[in-house]
């Protein structure tokens, strides 16, 4: 009987990470889920306390997994957060926080897990990006920027790690019904902005509506399962509402001016 694959998922206590962890446990995988609130994991997931913004915490989390499992077959970098507000009014500290979680957090995990995968001779890294990682969304510019950065990192790693039989994959979800909306941070200066106030409020209202009416997170879980089982997975996979995936898909075929106008109209700007 083949040995169960060992999967490590960050941000597994809620949202997409929780859905993915619960689904993979049901499929017979050995699951380790990380969170700052590890007690909130789905049944069957082995909890690991982790703050992805802390080097020591990341190293300790990977060590904790390896004390309980002989290997790490799949790393899923899912932990993330969002910040909303104009770029002009976003402080450098707020921007750093966005990148510490969404970009450097994933990079820290990769740097700890890649040596493990090289030693064992194979592995798979799945980075959860976003459709926002392909489009600079108005008033979510820092979130988009962090996901753009993750996209570039993933593409480079895929080439660097190919000789070691380590495959890197990016999942680009659209809007899903998760706690992302409730946990989104709003730039402090944007909350009573006289410069961007009404336009920011309009755009944010659209984001919230689409997220609250988003797709079922189980779609991402099923996609992740297929990616893990695939013999030769692609670099990128989009998942979510057809309209959102199509909107991103047409971008390469439209002039920038036209696409930007369509985006502005979409968010009532």
Image (tube, grey):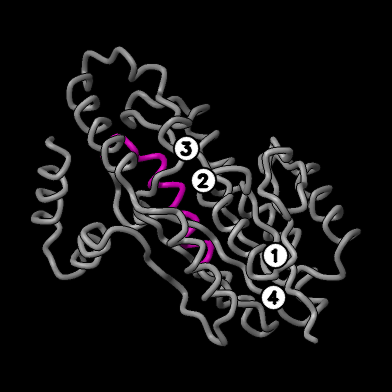
Within the magenta stretch, is there residue 139?
yes
Q: Disc 1 and disc 4: Cα gap in Å?
A: 10 Å
Q: Who's the residue at 73% across and 55% down the image? A: 44
The answer to whether residue 160 is above or below residue 181 is below
Q: Say the numbered circle drawn on residue 15.
A: 2
Q: Disc 3 and disc 1: Cα gap in Å?
A: 23 Å
The answer to whether residue 86 is above or below residue 50 is above
Q: Who's the residue at 22% across and 19% down the image? A: 197
Label 3: few (<14), some (14–19) or many (≥20) C-alpha neighbours in 10 Å = few
Per the image, label 3 sits on a secondary structure element best described as: loop
> x, y percentage for residue 194?
22, 13
Q: Earlier in the sequence, mark 3 or mark 4?
A: 4
Is residue 207 left or right of 251 when viewed as pictured? Answer: right
User: Can see residue 63?
Assistant: yes
Q: Earlier in the sequence, mark 2 or mark 3?
A: 2
Disc 4 target residue: 123
Q: Disc 3 and disc 4: Cα gap in Å?
A: 30 Å
Q: Disc 2 and disc 1: Cα gap in Å?
A: 17 Å
Disc 3 target residue: 179
Q: Who's the residue at 29% across and 53% down the image? A: 135
Q: Which residues are magenta?
A: 138-154
Q: Quadrant of the N terminus?
A: bottom right
User: Can see residue 148?
Assistant: no
Label 4: few (<14), some (14–19) or many (≥20) C-alpha neighbours in 10 Å = many
Is residue 169 left or right of 75 when viewed as pictured? Answer: left
Label 2: few (<14), some (14–19) or many (≥20) C-alpha neighbours in 10 Å = some
Q: Earlier in the sequence, mark 2 or mark 4?
A: 2
Q: Say the numbered circle drawn on residue 7.
A: 1
Q: Who's the residue at 62% across and 57% down the image? A: 21
User: Is 93 or 117 nearer to us in this picture?
Assistant: 117
Q: Are marks 2 and 4 in contact (CB under 8 Å)?
A: no
Main SS, magenta residues: helix
């Amino acid at each position: 009987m083949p040995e169960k694959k060992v999967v490590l998922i960050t941000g597994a206590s809620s949202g997409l990470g929780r859905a993915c962890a619960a689904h993979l446990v049901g499929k017979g995988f050995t699951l380790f889920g990380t969170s700052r609130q590890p007690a909130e994991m789905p049944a069957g997931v082995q909890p690991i306390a982790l703050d992805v913004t802390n080097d020591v915490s990341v190293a300790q989390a990977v060590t904790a997994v390896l004390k309980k499992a002989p290997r790490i077959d799949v790393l899923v970098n899912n932990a993330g957060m969002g910040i909303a507000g104009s770029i002009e009014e976003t402080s450098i500290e707020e921007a750093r926080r966005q990148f510490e979680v969404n970009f450097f957090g994933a990079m820290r995990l990769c740097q700890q897990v890649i040596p493990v995968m090289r030693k064992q001779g194979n592995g798979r890294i799945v980075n959860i990006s976003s459709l926002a990682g392909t489009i600079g969304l108005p008033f979510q510019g820092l979130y988009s920027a962090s996901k753009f950065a993750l996209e570039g990192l993933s593409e480079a790693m895929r080439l660097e790690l190919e000789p070691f039989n380590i495959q890197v994959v990016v999942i680009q979800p659209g809007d899903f019904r998760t706690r992302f909306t409730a946990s989104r941070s709003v730039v402090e200066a944007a909350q009573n902005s006289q410069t961007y106030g009404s336009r920011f409020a309009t755009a944010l209202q659209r984001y919230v509506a689409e997220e609250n009416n988003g797709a079922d997170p189980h779609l991402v879980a099923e996609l992740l399962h297929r990616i893990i089982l695939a013999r030769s997975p692609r670099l990128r996979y989009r998942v979510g509402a057809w309209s959102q995936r199509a909107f991103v898909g047409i971008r390469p075929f439209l002039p920038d001016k036209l696409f930007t106008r369509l985006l502005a109209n979409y968010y009532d700007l």
